Image (cartoon, rainbow, N blue to C red):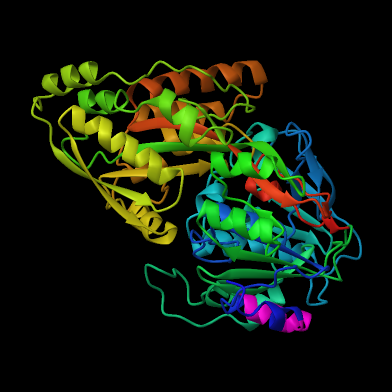
Amino acid sequence: MFLFRKQMMMLTASACIAAVASGLPAAAATPADTLVEALAIDDIITLDPGEAFELSTAEITANSYSLLVRLDANDTSKIQPDLAESWTISEDGLTYTFKLKPGLTFASGNPITAEDVAFSFERAVKLDKNPAFLLNQFGLTGANVAEKARAVDATTFALTVDQPYAPSFVLNVLTSTVGSVVDKKVVMEHAKAVTPTDEYKYDTDFGNEFLKTGYAGSGPFVTKVWKANEAVVLERNDKYFGEKPKLARVIYRHMKESSGQRLALEAGDIDVARNLDPGDVEAVQKNGALKTVSAAKGTVYYISLNQKNPNLAKPEVVEAMKYLLDYDAVGSTLIKGIGEIHQTFLPKGQLGALEDKPYELDVAKAKELLAKAGLKDGFTVTMDVRNTQPVTGIAEAFQQSAAKAGIKVEIIPGDGKQTLTKYRARNHDIYIGQWGSDYWDPNSNAETFSANPDNSDEGKSKTLAWRNAWDVPALTAETKAALLEKDAAKRAEIYEDLQKKVLATGPYVMVYQQVEVAGYSDKLSGYKLGPTFDSNLLAPVSKN
């Protein structure tokens, strides 16, 4: 690991970036102007904010792109300005008008105008990638987006939605990655002409191939390098309109093993370790030269059951699966200090979140339910698992308990991209995954766990309910109705009802809510974790 230590210490900053991005080991003492984080980033599929829908990418885009508005990480009930200086809502609740701050520029030097904002909305909708459904919720389509999301003048942008939704819902959606504003001039200079297909509906790719690894933003950092399963490198954007980053660059090194991250942190090879197991967290806490920080995340972990599988589609089997995990053991060992057992789909801290925990390990109960389903001898099923902890440990615990009930679970390990791609195509039997709220509103989780407008393979709203082929028209209608309720108490009641119904019948074994913990060098100041991955902001971080 330290073979090139001396050579790395002698490299210039740019050479250090290239070396780390090429997979060479980093220096034992990280550069004074550089933050080096160890993080499992094998879930990254693209850096294009109009396509990205992964947790690691959400953090990277949050630090490199700007939004109209942003979640206040210190008070999640509030929305704060980013590119927007102010905004108003029409009396009918349909039109949101944003006034941009004066004198804004992209990292390219191009001015940021309302036309760039309108283009970013149009581009995301017409690309029709995974996050497009977030904007489709407002009634935006390829046919009407140019009319509904438009530049009134150079500094005024207007968004017209199809129904008078709760304003908190609309504004929170705009804080998600898909709301990132891209530099129209740069993007279209790199756009490719294409023949319309299932991948691209129009005669242009809207710069999608370029932005998979390229950059066209205005955030505090500029994305310089992404090498899959190796590294992501960000450099300070000196044209950033807000408080300038204190460090010159940030390097995310792909490291999956907790022990490897801890050893690298202790040796000074990295400044921050992001994927520590409970035992390694304790070791870091005992080290006087290191510190830890934690934050409850709006991220829940779950085991999902594809309803295309005839055995898993039986209601009794769905219920039985919820009795085949030793939640107490998982909570006291695998997620100790890094999560809390949580069996409902809304994370604590969001409007209407419940903390009901009706399920516990009960093999006898599971066997009884399997017998009612006509499967008293059990069955065989596969389970796709990202090979990282604590996911692998939870999958193995589930596998062992299921075996006691006669269910043979074959674990298929893979990296984040492999397992997620298969899951999104509905080609799994069982999948263990995580869902981080795209925005801090209960609809983010409610819609994905309890709504499925079109259960066909061609369905455009690819929610978790859709991925698991759970056809629930009544729940879908109830989920949609919650968006129009402006009274917070009444809205909370709807989400409480939805959680109870999904808890009882949904094809999910809800496991826990994440508490993100990071170990870091005591040389750092200002390092914090937010309630979401896109609120893990790095501009305030400095080194002593």
Q: Is residue 146 visible?
A: no
Q: Which residues are magenta?
A: 10-20
Q: Is residue 302 visible?
A: yes
Report the front residue among 412 and 318. 412
The quarter of the image holding the N terminus is bottom right
Quarter of the rendering containing residue 318: top left
Quarter of the rendering containing residue 221: bottom right
Q: Where is 198 relative to 358, above or below?
A: below
Q: Residue at x 48, y 16 (%)?
A: 356
The quarter of the image holding the C terminus is bottom right
For residue 510, side relative to residue 208 (left or right): left
Quarter of the rendering containing residue 120: bottom right
Q: What is the x, y in percent for residue 246?
A: 87, 62
Q: What is the x, y in percent for residue 164?
A: 64, 34
Residue 84 colored magenta?
no
Q: Where is 126 relative to 196, above or below?
A: above
Q: Residue at x 51, y 70 (%)?
A: 228
